[in-house]
Image (cartoon, rainbow, N blue to C red):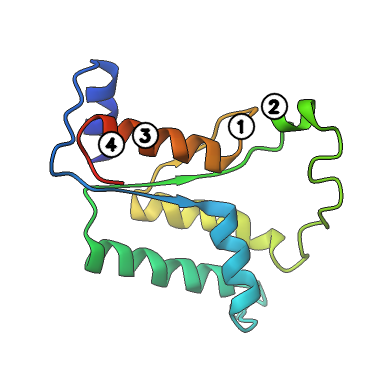
Amino acid sequence: MHRAMAQKQSQNDVDLSGQTVWVIDLFSRVYQLFHALPEMSSPEGTPVSVIFGLTRDLIDITEKKKPNYLFCGSDTPEPTFRHKQFEAYKATRSEMPADLVPQLPLVKKLLEVFGVPCIELAGYEADDVLATLAVQTVAAGGDC
């Protein structure tokens, strides 16, 4: 499903008429789940509350909303153009919670299992990439 869209995009003949594309800002959702759900852990003691919540979300989206395409966008560790324009951008943001760190590789694995591509572009934040994808989707006749 996602590969077909990528192949069409490379041919510049994308027609998404009647198609629905869903996009998820991955880290935004991960933080929401981390702070909203109670602590959960695997039998080995690994925190898994985010994995539980994201699994629930992905099942809900795919089974109830039934988008034709589903993508996640993720921030990269590199500075963005905003950091270059405003040196103090996100300077007061606290470090990632310790119980969230071990869940991130599991989040990536979960997306792979669900077949959800995660788009990352150095120098840009997830919302920039996803906004661009949304604009391109609408321009190609789809809904986002």
Q: Does residue 80 appear to the left or right of 11 in the view shown?
A: right
Number of disc labels: 4
What residue sits right under mark 4 in the picture? 138
Q: Which mark is residue 81?
A: 2
Query: Residue 35 has which mark?
Result: none
**Image location of residue 134, percent across then percent down:** 37, 39
Q: CA distance from mark 1 to mark 4?
A: 21 Å
Distance CA(mark 2)–CA(mark 1) = 7 Å
Q: Amino acid at mark 3?
A: Val
Q: Are marks 2 and 1 in contact (CB under 8 Å)?
A: yes
Q: Give the x, y percent position of residue 36.
A: 60, 77
Q: Which mark is residue 124?
A: 1
Q: Name the foreground residue: 131 vs 9.
A: 131
Question: Given contact means CB atoms under 8 Å apart, are the residues at marks 3 and 2 in contact?
Answer: no
| Residue identifier under label 3 | 135
SS for tag 4? helix
Label 3 Cα neighbours within 10 Å, binned few <14 / some 14-19 / many ≥20: few
N-terminal of the pair, mark 1 or mark 4, is 1
Mark 1 residue type: Tyr
Q: Of marks 3 and 2, which one's residue comes earlier in the chain?
A: 2
